[in-house]
Image (cartoon, grey):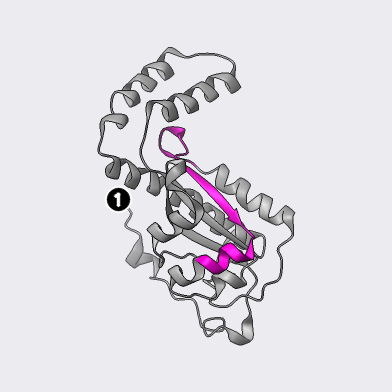
Amino acid sequence: MELLDKLKWRYAAKAMNGKKIPQEKVDRILEAARLAPTSSGLQPFEIFVITNQEIKEKIKPVAWNQSVITDCSHLLVFAAWDTYTEERINYMFDLTNEIRGFKNEGWENYRQMLLSSYPQKDPEENFNHAAKQAYIAFSQAIAAAAFEGVDATPIEGFDPDAVDKILGLREKGLRSAVLLPLGYRQEDQDWLVNLVKVRKPTEDLVTVIE
C-alpha cells in the first residue's frame, strides 16, 4: 500500500524550486530504471543525467520553454539506440554469459535468432522498438521517484533532433526518446498542485477475461 499511496501523491509538477535531491535518492531512482525489464534483456537505451545548468538552459527553448527543465535538480534524458546491431546484441548476450558463468544452448540459439532478425530491419523500426523499451525504464523511474518523495515530470514536448544535437547523441548511435526532470515542487507557482488527481475508474480501464 505504501507504493500506491506514493503514486497517489505524485503528479506532473509544473514548477520546481531548484532544491537539490540527495545523491542517494537519485542513485536509487536510476537503479530502479536499470532494473526495469526490457525485450530480450537488451536494455537498448542509455540515460543521461544532466545537472549542468548551461546545458539545461540550452535544452529549455527546444522543450517548449518549460520551467522545470531549468528549475529541476536533475534532468534525465532517456536515449534509445538508433538501431540494433550485431555488436550491441552480442555485447548483452556475452555479458549475460560472463555474469552467469556458463553458456546455455537455448540462450545461444536465441542470440542467433535475434542476430538474424533485428539488424536487418529498417533502422526507424528498430529505434521505435528501442524507444518503447526506454519508456519501460522511464516509467519505473517515475514510480521510484514517487517512492523517494521526489517529483518527476514526464516530458515528450521537445524537439528530439535539437536535444540530440545539444548532447551529441547521434554520434553515439543514440536518439532522445523522452525527458524526465527530477526535483521538488514549487507549490505557490504550480497551478496543478492542489487539483484532484483524475484517472479513469477501474471498471472503464480494466477488463477481466476469465
Q: How many marks?
A: 1
The image shows residue 70 at horizontal and vertical percentages of: 58, 71
Near-viewer residue (201 or 116): 116
The image shows residue 95 at horizontal and vertical percentages of: 54, 24
Near-viewer residue (20 or 169): 169
Residue at image mark 1: 209
Q: Helix or strand or loop: what does disc 1 sit on?
A: loop
Q: Give the quadrant of the N terminus.
A: bottom right
Residue 29 within the magenta-colored segment of the rendering: no
* Quarter of the image where one finds residue 120: top left
Q: Is residue 32 among what the camera can see?
A: yes
Seen in the picture, residue 115 relative to 157 is either above or below; the reply is above
Picture residue at 44% right of the left edge, 43% below the top: 171
The image shows residue 205 at horizontal and vertical percentages of: 35, 63
Task: Sort mark 1 into few (<14), some (14-19) or many (20+) by Cα contacts within 10 Å.
Answer: few
The amino acid sitting under disc 1 is Ile
Q: Is residue 183 left or right of residue 84?
A: right
Q: Is residue 51 left or right of residue 65?
A: right
Near-viewer residue (28 or 53): 53
Q: Which residues are magenta?
A: 37-58
Q: Is residue 160 left or right of residue 17?
A: left
* Quarter of the image where one finds residue 188: bottom right
Picture residue at 62% right of the left edge, 46% below the top: 31
The image shows residue 110 at horizontal and vertical percentages of: 37, 22
Picture residue at 46% right of the left edge, 34% below the top: 41
* Quarter of the image where one finds residue 190: bottom right
Picture residue at 59% right of the left edge, 16% below the top: 101
Q: Is residue 126 left or right of residue 8?
A: left
Q: Is residue 153 among what the camera can see?
A: no
